[in-house]
Amino acid sequence: MKVFENIKDFVKIKKAVVTIGTFDGVHVGHVKILKKLIQKSKEINGESVVVTFSPHPRKVIFKDNNLKLLNTDEEKIFLLKNIGIDNLIIHPFTKEFSRISSVEFVRDILINKIGTKILIIGYNHQFGRNREGSFNDLFEYSNIFDFKVQKISVEEVDNISVSSTKIRDAISNGDFKIAGKYLNYEYNFLGLVRKGDRLGRTINFPTANLELMNDDKLIPKDGVYYVTVEIDKKQHKGMLNIGFSPTVGKGMKKIEVHIIDLDRDLYDKIIKITFKKWIRSEKKFNDLIELKKQLEIDLKLIKKI
C-alpha cells in the first residue's frame, strides 16, 4: 500500500476507485465499504484509493479537543494495509481545506488530482464546505465530470447500526464485548513504560507505569481491567488500573499494569495493551494490607479467565 501525507503528493492514476472518510476504528461498517472499493477496482483493472484526514475534522471545525479516537494514524495505516487497499491519502485537515466547496472538491481533487472513475461512499456521507454536498449533489456532479457514484447501506450488527461514536461509547464504559463485535478486533493501545514510585513492589504487585504514545487515543473509564500485554512479540496476562490510585495516590491520574508472572526492568520500553474485560471500579482502602487482599482476589479472578 502506498501512503501519501498530502493530496498534492498523489500522482493521478487512470482508473481510481475512491472512498472518503475519517475511518476511525476501521470498524465492520467501514470494512463493508472498503471491500466494495477493492472489488470495484479489480473489476475495472484500476486501483483503490482511500482519502482520509488528520487531525479529525471535528477537532478543526468544532474545536472539539475532548474528542478521543479509536485509532492513531499509524494504527489506521496498519488496518487499511491488511485489508488490501492500494493507495491511502492522509490529508492535513485545516480550516482553509474545510472551506472548499463541494463542486471544487469533486472537480479539483477527485477528478483532476486523483482521477476518480468510481466513488464509493457510506449511506450518510456529506462533504465540502459546511457539509453542503449530499448524495444527490454527487450524482449530479457524476454526470458533469463523468464518474460513477455508488452508495453503501448501513452495516448492522444485531440490528444496531455501527458507528465510531457507538464504539467509543462502548469502550468508554468498559464494554469490550460490544466494542469487539463492532470493530472485529480487540481494542488496544501502545504505552511507554516510565519510572513510578515503585510502591507496588512493597506489596508484591510490581507495576509498569504507562505513558500513552498518542494523547488523542481513547482510554476506557477508571477501574481495574484484565488485559494482555505484548512485550517483544510475546503475550502475557496482565491486571491494569486506570485512575487516581485513591489508597496511595497523589491526585494524579495514572495507567499502570501488573504483568502476571513477569518481573523485569521494562523502563523506556514500548508495550502493547489489549483490553479483555472490565473487572471492577477503583476503590479506596484503609491501608495497603486491604489493598493487597483485593488485588489478590482480582488476580485470582483474572487467572481463571
Image: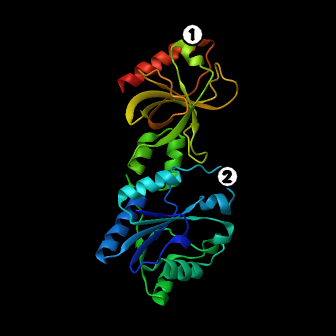
Relative side of 132 to 174, left or right: right
From what the image shows, is residue 133 above or below residue 292?
below
Residue 118: x, y in percent?
40, 78
Comparing 183 with 81, the one in front is 81
Q: Residues within 10 Å of mark 2 (few under 14, many from 20)?
A: few
Regarding mark 1 in the picture, which secondary structure is present there? helix
Name the mark on residue 240. Answer: none
From what the image shows, is residue 254 above or below residue 138?
above
The residue beneath circle 1 is 289
From what the image shows, is residue 103 above or below residue 160?
below
Regarding mark 2 in the picture, which secondary structure is present there? loop
- The residue at the point 50 percent across, 85 percent down is 141
Give the position of the C terminus as an image quadrant: top left
Q: Residue furthest top?
A: 289
CA distance separating discs 2 and 1: 40 Å
Name the mark on residue 65. Answer: 2
- The residue at the point 46 percent across, 17 percent down is 297
Residue 48: x, y in percent?
39, 70
